[in-house]
Amino acid sequence: MNMNTRSLNAFVVAFTAIAILPSISLGAQNTAATTDQAPRALAAPKPDYSYALRHDEVEGRVVVTFTVTPSGGVADAAVVSSTQKRLEKPTLEAIKKWTFSPAVKAGVPVRSRVIQPVAFKMAD
């Protein structure tokens, strides 16, 4: 295989991969009593699905848990489970950038715990 063919193949792999498929619905689990309104994602940047991961055809799923603060930020993000260790760091880095409309109880924003799966999958 010549150099141009290898470069083209790498380019095709890079652009045929789906960055990630985050679940849109949040698995909110409030640490306090039930809320009137669950947290809602306002911005959820996708984790970096790097060239190295795509080149190695690394796929998998990372489940993270974190707290949505009353101001809508993310705190205490941690991996609950992972099918591929190499996907954990980019997932946590992205989750920390997410912003939310926080959970509300009696008209007041409150902290809530969320469990969120994130899938990394190469395009077919």
Image (cartoon, grey):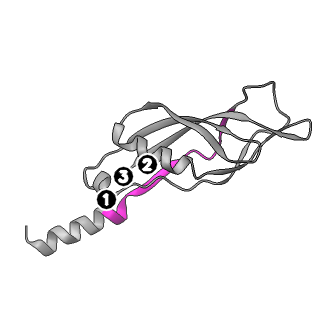
Residue furthest toward the left? Answer: 1
Residue furthest toward the right? Answer: 106
Which element carries disc 3, helix, strand or loop? loop
- In the image, 36 versus 67, the foreground residue is 67
Tell me the mark number nearer the camera, choosing from 1 and 3.
1
- Image-based side of 105 in relation to 113, left or right: right
User: From the image, which quarter does the N terminus lie in?
Assistant: bottom left
- Disc 1 residue type (three-letter): Tyr
Image quadrant where residue 49 sits: bottom left
When the figure is inspected, residue 42 is found, relative to residue 25, above or below; the finding is: below
Residue at position x 24%, y 65% in the image: 10
Residue at position x 60%, y 53% in the image: 44
Circle 1 sits on which residue? 51
- In the image, 34 versus 2, the foreground residue is 34
Q: Position of residue 17 (x, y in %)?
A: 37, 58
Q: Earlier in the sequence, mark 2 or mark 1?
A: 1
Q: Position of residue 77 (x, y in %)?
A: 56, 38
Q: Earlier in the sequence, mark 1 or mark 3?
A: 1
- Image-based side of 49 in relation to 54, left or right: right
- Image-based side of 95 in relation to 36, left or right: left
Residue at position x 91%, y 41% in the image: 107
Circle 3 sits on which residue? 122
Circle 2 sits on which residue? 90
Does the magenta portion include 123?
Answer: no
- In the image, 29 versus 25, the foreground residue is 29
Q: What residue span does the magenta drawing correspond to?
A: 14-28
Q: Are marks 2 and 1 in contact (CB under 8 Å)?
A: no
Mark 2 and mark 3: span between their CA atoms?
A: 16 Å
